[in-house]
Image: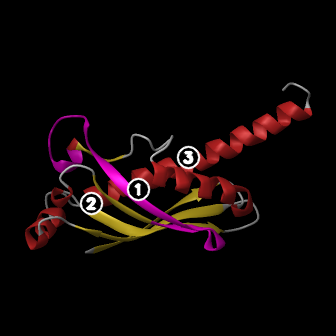
Amino acid sequence: MKPVEMHVDLPLPASAARDEALELFAALARHEAPFDDLALAVGLRALHIPVGGELRIPVSTQVELAPTRWEATVELEATDHPGLFPRFQGTLTLNPVGVTTSELWLQGTYHAPLGGLGERIDATVLHGAAERSLHELLDRIAAAIVAKIREREDAAARRARGLA
């Protein structure tokens, strides 16, 4: 078991991002857009394979919303052959930072497959691969939150100008 703690800055106040974040956490649970093709990915070069491209592992999710705490518990595991890939358990949390910014955190633990052998492979050959794939997922969720807020603001501005 290895601890994971990472965050992404959001150029939005938490109060504005809250509803969109909770909606996206729920979409993650239901495998709906933009998470209908959810997979954790790692670049082949990061695996010491000297070619471009990436290894994508489709994952299933279990998400439980805790809206009073602006967070959701998350479990991720490979859809096919889960015993061969890491499994993650943790939380996604939206935290206010200031008046105009917030942070999206992913904290928890991932469990390497295959017991002690898997832990040794993870620490050497695959060093950092699981963390990079989780950070890509966190970046994807953050980008979706920002995009939804921007779309909502643009729609409101068009309505205010009488264009919608």
Q: Which residue is at 72% across, 60% downward?
A: 13
Residue under label 2, please give it: 128
What are the residue bounds of the magenta stretch? Answer: 45-73
Seen from the viewer's position, the closer of residues 23 and 149 is: 23
Residue 70 lies left or right of residue 79; in this view the side is: right
Residue 96 lies left or right of residue 120; in this view the side is: right
Q: Are marks 1 and 2 in contact (CB under 8 Å)?
A: no
Q: Earlier in the sequence, mark 3 or mark 2?
A: 2
The x, y position of residue 157, in whole percent, is 84, 36
Which of the two discs, 3 and 2, sits closer to the camera? 3
Q: Earlier in the sequence, mark 1 or mark 2?
A: 2
Amino acid type shown at disc 1 = His
Residue under label 3, please give it: 143
Amino acid type shown at disc 3 = Ala
Q: Is residue 139 visible?
A: no
Residue under label 1, please give it: 135
- In this view, the residue farthest toward the left is 117
The x, y position of residue 75, in whole percent, is 38, 64
Q: Quadrant of residue 90?
A: bottom left
The residues bearing labels 3 and 1 have C-alpha atoms spaced at a distance of 12 Å
- Does dot 3 land on a helix, a strand or a loop? helix
- Does dot 2 land on a helix, a strand or a loop? loop
Seen from the viewer's position, the closer of residues 17 and 24 is: 24
Residue 111 to residue 22: above or below: below
The x, y position of residue 28, in whole percent, is 48, 52
